[in-house]
């Protein structure tokens, strides 16, 4: 018997606030549906398991519902039965019973299992809805009562303690279940961790992962060194699992199926090593060597600024202009100023001005106003700078000593 196992579809997820990313998640689901139907035609897949977080929100929009209906209708029309269990995104903690999966189940598109099972000869498929860690005892007790005498495949949406995930995941601790409390004589079709084909070290438990990129650590990654871009890693694979079930022998053979296509998600690591702004801006020109068409791009700038220079001097605001045709460019700055050279305190320009004014004026609010005014002048906002200083000094327009060239 062949079973396709998908998870963490997250239909409706507007990642980074982008409608295009919501469409990407929908397309990934429909792409997986196409691949499963193809596998049914070529290899005879019988059943599809969906182990939670089908939806990103327990109240999906009508268009999100329509995408789910479209995909599951195609699977049903191809002769496939779909079994779904609940993830932490699919239902509210207050009322887990009324959720969008139960709506799909009532329409006959899917079979919804929550502390329930369905038998296929000697094979029993058990579905367990996601529960907080504090309720894991109730879940494991219910599981033991549901297990059959043959081969059991247990669908759950939990982090099984000890699974060696690489990337931090939200709510790991909140939805953890101890591996020591789970029966060893079963196969666990699990969801919640988004890494493709991730296995538990001791239990027969495998995560198919999400169908779309979830975290920036999964991005195609580059590093900019001396104006040249070098690839650090490929974009992480996404897909589902094909389970070849030997009912008589009580074994499950797992085959990862990778999904192709999808939007490129790119991360670029840029380091500032105290070089002058002119040298750094020259190095930034290397960003334009890559094709960014329709990609989501994140640029992480870290390091130490050169002595006496400010963030504005380095022209970080020009980065987006160097990356053309991208869906969106997000620049993240985590830079600091060098605090000491050869044992002496060396201040940047703004810190030096702040120190001198502080000693001579003795008024923190006036000092801050002067610093803000300097920023405004550097941006060409002369009138705004004058108003800021006048308010701080409580003076009128007749003061003649304040002159800007």
Image (cartoon, rainbow, N blue to C red):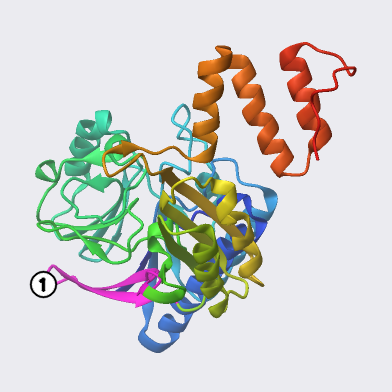
Residue 244 falls within the magenta-colored stretch: yes
Q: Where's the C terminus, which quadrant?
A: top right
Farthest front residue? Answer: 401
**Circle 1 residue:** 249
Would you say 366 lies left or right of 212 here? right
Q: Quadrant of residue 343?
A: top left
| Residue occupying image coordinates x 35% and y 61% | 209
| Residue occupying image coordinates x 73% and y 39% | 377
Residue 315 in sight from this viewpoint: yes
Q: Quadrant of residue 347?
A: top left
| Residue 78 in the image: above or below residue 373 | below
Per the rendered image, the range of residues in magenta is 232-259
- Most frequent secondary structure within the magenta stretch: strand
Farthest bottom residue? Answer: 42
Find residue 178 and report its horizontal and vertical position in percent.
16, 41
Find residue 22 and report its horizontal and vertical position in percent.
60, 57
| Residue occupying image coordinates x 77% and y 11% | 394
């Amino acid at each position: 018997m062949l079973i396709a196992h998908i998870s963490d579809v997250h239909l409706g997820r507007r990642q980074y606030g982008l409608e295009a990313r919501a469409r990407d998640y929908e397309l990934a689901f429909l792409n997986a549906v196409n691949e499963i139907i193809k596998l049914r035609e070529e290899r005879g897949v019988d059943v599809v398991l969906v182990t939670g977080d089908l939806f990103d929100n327990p109240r999906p929009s009508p268009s999100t519902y329509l995408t789910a209906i479209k995909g599951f209708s195609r699977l049903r029309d191809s002769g496939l039965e779909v079994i779904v269990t609940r993830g932490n995104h699919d239902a509210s903690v207050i009322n887990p019973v009324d959720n969008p999966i139960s709506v799909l189940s009532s329409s006959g598109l899917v079979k919804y299992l929550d502390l329930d099972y369905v038998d296929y000869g000697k094979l029993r498929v058990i579905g367990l809805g996601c529960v907080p860690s504090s309720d894991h005892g109730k879940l494991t007790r219910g599981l033991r009562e549901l297990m059959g005498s043959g081969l059991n495949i247990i669908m759950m949406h939990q982090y099984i303690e000890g699974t060696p995930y690489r990337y931090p995941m939200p709510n790991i601790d909140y939805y953890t279940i101890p591996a020591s409390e789970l029966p060893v004589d079963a196969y666990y079709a699990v969801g919640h961790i988004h890494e493709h084909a991730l296995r538990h070290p001791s239990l027969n438990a495998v995560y198919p992962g999400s169908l779309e990129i979830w975290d920036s650590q999964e991005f195609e990654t580059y590093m900019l060194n001396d104006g040249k871009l070098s690839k650090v890693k490929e974009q992480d694979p996404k897909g589902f699992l094909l389970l070849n079930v030997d009912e008589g022998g009580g074994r499950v053979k797992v085959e990862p199926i990778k999904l192709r296509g999808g939007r490129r998600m790119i991360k670029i690591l840029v380091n500032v090593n105290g070089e002058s702004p002119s040298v750094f801006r020259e190095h930034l020109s290397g960003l334009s060597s890559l094709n960014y068409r329709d990609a989501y791009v994140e640029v992480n700038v870290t390091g130490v600024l050169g002595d006496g220079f400010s963030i504005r001097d380095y022209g970080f605001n020009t980065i987006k202009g160097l990356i053309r045709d991208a869906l969106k460019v997000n620049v993240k700055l985590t830079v600091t100023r060098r605090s000491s050279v050869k044992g002496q305190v060396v201040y940047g320009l703004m810190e030096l001005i702040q120190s001198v004014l502080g000693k001579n004026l003795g008024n923190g609010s006036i000092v801050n106003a002067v610093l803000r005014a300097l920023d405004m002048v550097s941006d060409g906002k002369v009138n705004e700078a004058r108003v800021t200083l006048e308010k701080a000094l409580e003076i009128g327009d007749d003061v003649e000593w304040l002159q800007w060239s």
